[in-house]
Image (cartoon, coloured by chain):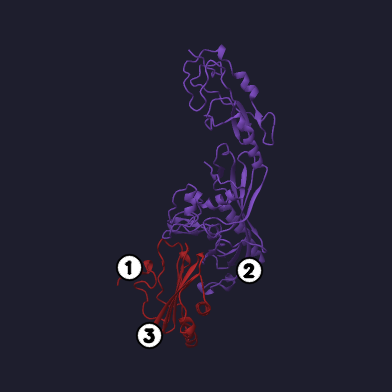
Chain colours: A purple, B red
Amino acid sequence: MSKCWMNLSSGPAPTTQRAPAPVCPAPQRSQSRYGNCFLQEQMSTEANACEETPVVDTCGPAESLPEPTCDAPPPEPVGLCTAYGNFLVWPDETMGPLAEKAPDGSFQVFERQVDPLLAELDAFHASCYAVPNFQPSTGPGIFDAGFTPGPGAGGVMTVSVRFAFSFVAAQSPGDYPTADAAALDWADDAEKETWKTDFFAAVSGAWSGAHRFAVLEPYWEQVQSSVEVNLYEDTSSPHYTLTVQKIPAGEFAGSAASAARPGSTQGSASLDSEDLTPAAKAGGNQQRGAVHEFGHMIGLGDEYAGKAAPRHNASFEAAGGATIATGDDDRIMSGGETVLQEHYITFLEGLRAATARPTWGYAP
Amino acid sequence: MSGAALLLGALIGCGAASGEPAGPALLVVEKTSLGGEPEANRRWRVETDGDLFFVANRAPVEAGVVWNVPFPTEPLARLDAASLAALREQVQSPALWGLENQSATGVEDGMRLRLTLRRGGDTKELTFDNVEPAPVKALMTQLGALTRR
């Protein structure tokens, strides 16, 4: 009967031949700015007790680990905690291949892989990334894309859009026959400033933080990013000139966006003073016009019923998404304000471009 | 036609609906949303005798409905002779009749303006999507002023 060298505890006989995964405590000694903590000492006290423990005779091939070599000391992994996740580092002489992950979720790598991998991750995290005036594949649209790595999954993508405002009186006063003249023009600069501030807050609030991205390649999935949408006033080099007309409270005017075309760094849009007020839409949905029009500015198309496939559909499908249906529902590019993964497709493209890493995708 | 049929026609119609004034008018203007904002839809009708009708949709507007409020039976205003003559001059101007349909490219959402003009026994329909040529702007400015008077 062959001997197996994988029983690592003195407790009940193991049912599988697998080294227990290290439980990573708080980092005990920092070997990088990400706080690596090596658990070699802990592991060594638990391993190699085979001669003194009952022989395990169910030494079949492990599910995802190298088969134990019987009649010889088996290779033992070393636990390694990093900001990029927990690793089981196997000696290079271990028979491969290794499954990417152990059952507990730890990454499994050979010793020879560790330094290059961590060096690559460290290098990636040592930089900040930005692409000004990013234009997505979906057609018209523009924003500045940036990414700031953070420890663990704490990276942040920033989507920045710059605006130059033009506040004007009602463009078609005849649309409001009974309205007071005072309701057809901005009262003062304070009212405009309030609208501006509210616009920034409404759009940022509606579009930020709806989904997360992750680098979907082996050993990188802990590299993740949240999304922050920031709007700024910039009269010198705006992405959009935004005309905002004053209309009476509770009234409507048709808002529109002419997103920056490919090769151009500037587009325009027309909103009205009521576009920050939720309006009842078909099917019982509510929507603020401004947050919908912003979707066009960043490269998305309409998803209303009766429209052709939205112009972001092909890009979303290419990223692994399902075909986008059109319809009158609660999606932000239809009649509501729900931001789905499909609405982050241009952000995803911007993140890939900014970091020169095409393997970013939606975080699982 | 029954009242119910009149109302139904008004609610589901596109353009002058069944049961609504449909005879020759000097001018009919329809503004309709090209996006998801049919609450902004409104229309005007100026009869040859100077009666000016106006109606705006009432929110919310159900999916697929273009007009959810019929034209009122009473005009918003009755134009005096001078105002009517001035409007007729605008409506029948060669500059306006020489226009073709126009559509702004690269604009998402916004409004469509549809004009039905009458000159003698002739009528002309024009559609402008997110664009307002000068003769149209002049007409709409004049119509707006008459509407708010």
| Image: A169 above or below A364 | below
Q: Which of the chains bears the disc numbered 1?
A: B
The residue positioned 30% from the left and 71% from the top of the image is B2
- Which amino acid type is shown beneath numbered disc 2? Ala
Element marked by disc 3? loop
Q: Mark 1 points at which residue?
A: B4
Q: Mark 3 points at which residue?
A: B121
Few, some or many C-alpha atoms within 10 Å of disc 3 (few <14, some 14-19, many ≥20)?
A: few
The residue positioned 54% from the left and 73% from the top of the image is A173
Q: Which of the chains bears the disc numbered 2?
A: A
Whole-number angstrom distance, CA of label 3 to CA of label 2 = 47 Å
Which of the pair A297/A337 is nearer the observer? A297
Element marked by disc 1? helix
Query: Can you see residue A157?
Result: no
Going by the image, does A167 lie left or right of A281?
right
Q: Mark 2 points at which residue?
A: A187
Closer to the eye: label 3 or 2: 3
Q: Position of residue A34 (x, y in %)?
A: 67, 36
Which residue sits furthest left? Answer: B1
Few, some or many C-alpha atoms within 10 Å of disc 2 (few <14, some 14-19, many ≥20)?
A: few
- Which amino acid type is shown beneath numbered disc 1? Ala
Discs 1 and 2 share one subunit:
no
The residue positioned 58% from the left and 61% from the top of the image is A263
| Numbered circles on residues, count | 3
Closer to the eye: label 3 or 1: 3
Discs 3 and 1 share one subunit:
yes
Whole-number angstrom distance, CA of label 1 to CA of label 2 = 44 Å
Q: Which of the chains bears the disc numbered 3?
A: B
Which of the pair A344/A273 is nearer the observer? A344
